[in-house]
Amino acid sequence: MRIKSLVASLLLMLTAIAEEAYQPQHGDVVFQSLPNPFGMDLVDMIEGATGSPYSHCGMVIAEKGQWQVIEAIGPVQIIPLADWQARGRGKKLWAYRFDETKRKQIPQTIAAMKLDLGKPYDPRYRLDSEAIYCSELIYRGWKQATGETLGKTVTLQQLNWQPYQKIIVAIERSENIPLDREIITPRDLALAPQLKPVWPVVSQKKSK
Protein backbone atom coordinates (compact mmCIF):
# COMPACT_ATOMS: atom_id res chain seq x y z
CA MET A 1 0.00 0.00 0.00
CA ARG A 2 2.84 2.34 0.83
CA ILE A 3 4.43 1.79 -2.61
CA LYS A 4 1.09 2.46 -4.30
CA SER A 5 0.75 5.64 -2.28
CA LEU A 6 4.24 6.80 -3.28
CA VAL A 7 3.53 6.03 -6.95
CA ALA A 8 0.26 7.96 -6.78
CA SER A 9 2.02 10.93 -5.18
CA LEU A 10 4.73 10.84 -7.85
CA LEU A 11 2.15 10.79 -10.63
CA LEU A 12 0.34 13.75 -9.09
CA MET A 13 3.64 15.62 -8.83
CA LEU A 14 4.53 14.91 -12.46
CA THR A 15 1.06 16.01 -13.57
CA ALA A 16 1.40 19.25 -11.65
CA ILE A 17 4.80 19.91 -13.23
CA ALA A 18 3.39 19.23 -16.69
CA GLU A 19 0.46 21.57 -16.07
CA GLU A 20 2.85 24.31 -14.95
CA ALA A 21 4.99 24.02 -18.10
CA TYR A 22 4.35 26.15 -21.15
CA GLN A 23 2.16 24.19 -23.57
CA PRO A 24 2.95 25.57 -27.05
CA GLN A 25 0.50 25.89 -29.89
CA HIS A 26 1.23 26.39 -33.59
CA GLY A 27 1.48 30.13 -34.22
CA ASP A 28 2.20 31.29 -30.66
CA VAL A 29 4.30 34.44 -30.52
CA VAL A 30 7.04 34.07 -27.91
CA PHE A 31 9.18 36.75 -26.30
CA GLN A 32 12.37 36.64 -24.26
CA SER A 33 15.07 38.80 -22.71
CA LEU A 34 18.34 38.13 -24.48
CA PRO A 35 21.45 37.75 -22.33
CA ASN A 36 23.36 41.01 -22.21
CA PRO A 37 26.59 39.64 -23.74
CA PHE A 38 24.47 38.81 -26.83
CA GLY A 39 24.79 42.14 -28.69
CA MET A 40 24.86 43.88 -25.31
CA ASP A 41 24.46 47.48 -26.51
CA LEU A 42 21.56 46.62 -28.81
CA VAL A 43 19.82 44.48 -26.17
CA ASP A 44 20.12 47.22 -23.55
CA MET A 45 18.82 49.78 -26.04
CA ILE A 46 15.76 47.71 -27.05
CA GLU A 47 14.75 46.99 -23.47
CA GLY A 48 15.63 50.44 -22.15
CA ALA A 49 14.06 52.45 -24.95
CA THR A 50 10.80 50.50 -24.74
CA GLY A 51 10.70 50.03 -20.97
CA SER A 52 10.07 46.33 -21.51
CA PRO A 53 11.96 43.07 -20.83
CA TYR A 54 11.13 41.92 -24.36
CA SER A 55 14.30 42.23 -26.43
CA HIS A 56 13.56 39.37 -28.84
CA CYS A 57 10.61 37.44 -30.25
CA GLY A 58 9.73 34.67 -32.67
CA MET A 59 6.82 32.48 -33.74
CA VAL A 60 6.33 28.88 -32.62
CA ILE A 61 5.72 26.41 -35.43
CA ALA A 62 5.07 22.67 -35.45
CA GLU A 63 7.46 21.29 -38.04
CA LYS A 64 9.29 18.01 -38.64
CA GLY A 65 7.59 16.47 -35.62
CA GLN A 66 8.84 19.01 -33.11
CA TRP A 67 8.19 22.48 -31.79
CA GLN A 68 10.40 25.06 -33.46
CA VAL A 69 10.68 28.84 -33.66
CA ILE A 70 11.09 30.99 -36.75
CA GLU A 71 13.05 34.11 -35.83
CA ALA A 72 15.25 36.94 -37.06
CA ILE A 73 18.30 37.13 -34.84
CA GLY A 74 21.15 36.70 -37.32
CA PRO A 75 19.86 35.55 -40.63
CA VAL A 76 16.18 34.62 -40.45
CA GLN A 77 16.16 30.99 -39.34
CA ILE A 78 14.20 28.16 -37.72
CA ILE A 79 15.52 26.56 -34.51
CA PRO A 80 14.09 24.12 -31.92
CA LEU A 81 11.90 25.80 -29.30
CA ALA A 82 13.98 24.22 -26.52
CA ASP A 83 17.14 25.86 -27.90
CA TRP A 84 15.32 29.16 -28.34
CA GLN A 85 14.12 29.14 -24.74
CA ALA A 86 17.53 28.10 -23.41
CA ARG A 87 19.09 31.18 -25.00
CA GLY A 88 17.01 33.65 -22.99
CA ARG A 89 18.03 35.12 -19.65
CA GLY A 90 17.07 32.61 -17.00
CA LYS A 91 15.56 30.45 -19.78
CA LYS A 92 12.43 32.54 -19.35
CA LEU A 93 9.85 33.16 -22.06
CA TRP A 94 6.51 34.89 -22.44
CA ALA A 95 3.95 33.47 -24.85
CA TYR A 96 1.02 35.16 -26.61
CA ARG A 97 -1.65 33.41 -28.65
CA PHE A 98 -3.81 34.55 -31.52
CA ASP A 99 -7.52 34.92 -30.86
CA GLU A 100 -9.53 31.93 -32.10
CA THR A 101 -11.10 34.08 -34.80
CA LYS A 102 -7.64 34.84 -36.21
CA ARG A 103 -5.98 31.43 -36.00
CA LYS A 104 -7.01 30.41 -39.52
CA GLN A 105 -4.56 33.04 -40.79
CA ILE A 106 -1.56 31.41 -39.11
CA PRO A 107 -0.53 29.06 -41.98
CA GLN A 108 -0.48 31.93 -44.50
CA THR A 109 1.46 34.08 -42.02
CA ILE A 110 4.12 31.42 -41.52
CA ALA A 111 4.36 30.85 -45.27
CA ALA A 112 4.98 34.59 -45.74
CA MET A 113 7.59 34.62 -42.95
CA LYS A 114 9.45 31.72 -44.56
CA LEU A 115 9.98 33.84 -47.67
CA ASP A 116 12.40 35.88 -45.53
CA LEU A 117 14.51 32.88 -44.46
CA GLY A 118 18.20 33.62 -44.82
CA LYS A 119 17.83 37.41 -44.91
CA PRO A 120 20.30 39.28 -42.66
CA TYR A 121 19.41 40.94 -39.36
CA ASP A 122 18.64 44.66 -39.39
CA PRO A 123 20.03 46.45 -36.29
CA ARG A 124 18.75 49.74 -37.73
CA TYR A 125 15.13 48.61 -37.27
CA ARG A 126 13.87 49.67 -40.70
CA LEU A 127 10.58 48.38 -42.08
CA ASP A 128 11.79 47.16 -45.45
CA SER A 129 12.44 43.83 -47.18
CA GLU A 130 16.25 43.96 -47.39
CA ALA A 131 17.15 43.04 -43.82
CA ILE A 132 14.79 41.86 -41.09
CA TYR A 133 14.58 42.28 -37.31
CA CYS A 134 12.66 40.01 -34.94
CA SER A 135 9.34 41.77 -34.48
CA GLU A 136 9.37 42.97 -38.09
CA LEU A 137 9.48 39.35 -39.31
CA ILE A 138 6.18 38.55 -37.56
CA TYR A 139 4.63 41.94 -38.38
CA ARG A 140 5.48 41.56 -42.08
CA GLY A 141 4.25 37.98 -42.23
CA TRP A 142 0.90 38.83 -40.66
CA LYS A 143 0.38 41.90 -42.84
CA GLN A 144 1.21 40.02 -46.04
CA ALA A 145 -1.17 37.20 -45.09
CA THR A 146 -4.08 39.29 -43.81
CA GLY A 147 -3.66 42.91 -44.87
CA GLU A 148 -3.90 43.82 -41.16
CA THR A 149 -1.30 45.37 -38.92
CA LEU A 150 -0.20 43.42 -35.86
CA GLY A 151 0.54 45.93 -33.15
CA LYS A 152 1.05 49.65 -33.56
CA THR A 153 4.24 51.05 -35.04
CA VAL A 154 5.97 53.85 -33.18
CA THR A 155 8.66 56.30 -34.21
CA LEU A 156 12.08 56.38 -32.62
CA GLN A 157 11.19 59.80 -31.25
CA GLN A 158 8.35 58.24 -29.22
CA LEU A 159 10.78 55.91 -27.45
CA ASN A 160 13.27 56.66 -24.69
CA TRP A 161 16.09 56.95 -27.20
CA GLN A 162 18.20 59.71 -25.59
CA PRO A 163 20.26 57.48 -23.23
CA TYR A 164 21.23 55.37 -26.25
CA GLN A 165 22.21 58.16 -28.61
CA LYS A 166 25.81 56.94 -28.96
CA ILE A 167 24.64 53.42 -29.80
CA ILE A 168 22.21 54.72 -32.41
CA VAL A 169 24.89 56.90 -33.99
CA ALA A 170 27.27 53.93 -34.14
CA ILE A 171 24.62 51.70 -35.74
CA GLU A 172 23.55 54.39 -38.22
CA ARG A 173 27.14 55.47 -38.87
CA SER A 174 25.79 59.00 -38.89
CA GLU A 175 25.13 61.83 -36.46
CA ASN A 176 21.72 62.26 -38.07
CA ILE A 177 19.39 60.24 -35.85
CA PRO A 178 16.26 59.11 -37.75
CA LEU A 179 13.71 60.17 -35.14
CA ASP A 180 10.82 59.77 -37.59
CA ARG A 181 11.67 56.15 -38.46
CA GLU A 182 8.69 53.84 -37.93
CA ILE A 183 9.44 50.78 -35.81
CA ILE A 184 7.46 47.79 -34.60
CA THR A 185 9.08 46.93 -31.28
CA PRO A 186 8.68 43.58 -29.47
CA ARG A 187 6.76 45.43 -26.77
CA ASP A 188 4.31 46.95 -29.23
CA LEU A 189 3.89 43.65 -31.08
CA ALA A 190 2.83 42.05 -27.78
CA LEU A 191 0.19 44.77 -27.36
CA ALA A 192 -1.56 43.75 -30.60
CA PRO A 193 -5.31 43.23 -29.99
CA GLN A 194 -5.18 39.97 -31.99
CA LEU A 195 -2.93 38.44 -29.29
CA LYS A 196 -3.60 37.38 -25.72
CA PRO A 197 -1.00 36.37 -23.11
CA VAL A 198 -1.03 32.68 -22.22
CA TRP A 199 2.29 32.17 -20.42
CA PRO A 200 3.20 32.69 -17.62
CA VAL A 201 -0.35 31.96 -16.48
CA VAL A 202 -0.26 33.88 -13.19
CA SER A 203 -0.64 37.68 -13.17
CA GLN A 204 -0.72 38.01 -16.95
CA LYS A 205 -0.72 41.63 -18.06
CA LYS A 206 0.42 43.15 -21.34
CA SER A 207 3.33 45.54 -21.07
CA LYS A 208 2.54 49.22 -21.40
Image (cartoon, rainbow, N blue to C red):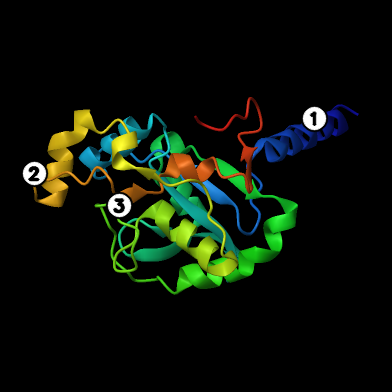
Residue 106: which numbered mark, if any? none
Quarter of the rendering containing residue 129: bottom left
> Up-down: is 20 above or below 83?
above
Give the image location of residue 56, x and y in percent.
40, 46
Q: State the image quarter where residue 41 is shown.
A: top left
Residue 6, placed above or below residue 115: above
State the count of labels. Answer: 3
Callout 2 secondary element: loop
Q: Which residue is found at the position 59% from the left and 65% from the top?
A: 146
Q: Nearer the viewer, residue 127 or 3?
A: 127
Q: CA distance from mark 3 to mark 2?
A: 17 Å
Q: Residues within 10 Å of mark 1 (few under 14, many from 20)?
A: few
Q: Which mark is residue 175?
A: 2
Q: Please name the residue shown 86% across and 26% down the image.
A: 2
> How crowded is the residue under tag 2: few (<14 C-alpha within 10 Å), some, or many (20+)?
few
The amino acid type, in three-letter code, at marker 3 is: Tyr
Splitting the image into 4 quarters, where does residue 89 fall? Answer: top left
Please report whichever mark, 1 or 2, sits nearer to the chain's N-terminal start.
1
Q: Which residue is mark 3?
A: 125
Residue at 29% over, 37% down:
157
**How would you rate the neighbour count of disc 3 (Cα within 10 Å): few for under 14, some for 14-19, many for 20 or more?**
some
Q: Which labelled disc corresponds to residue 9?
A: 1
Give the amino acid type for the residue marked by disc 1 in the picture.
Ser
Amino acid type of the residue that numbered disc 2 sits on in the rendered structure: Glu
Give the mark nearer the N terminus: 3 vs 2: 3
Give the number of the mark in front: 1 or 2: 2
Instruction: Using residue 69 as the reference point, say whether residue 169 is left or right of it.
Output: left
Do the CB atoms of the residues marked 1 and 2 lie less than 8 Å apart? no
Query: Where the N terminus falls, by quadrant?
Result: top right
Estimate the x, y position of residue 95 in percent, counting from the top left: 57, 43
In the rendered structure, which disc, 3 or 1, sits on the residue that comes first in sequence? 1
In this orientation, does residue 103 appear? yes
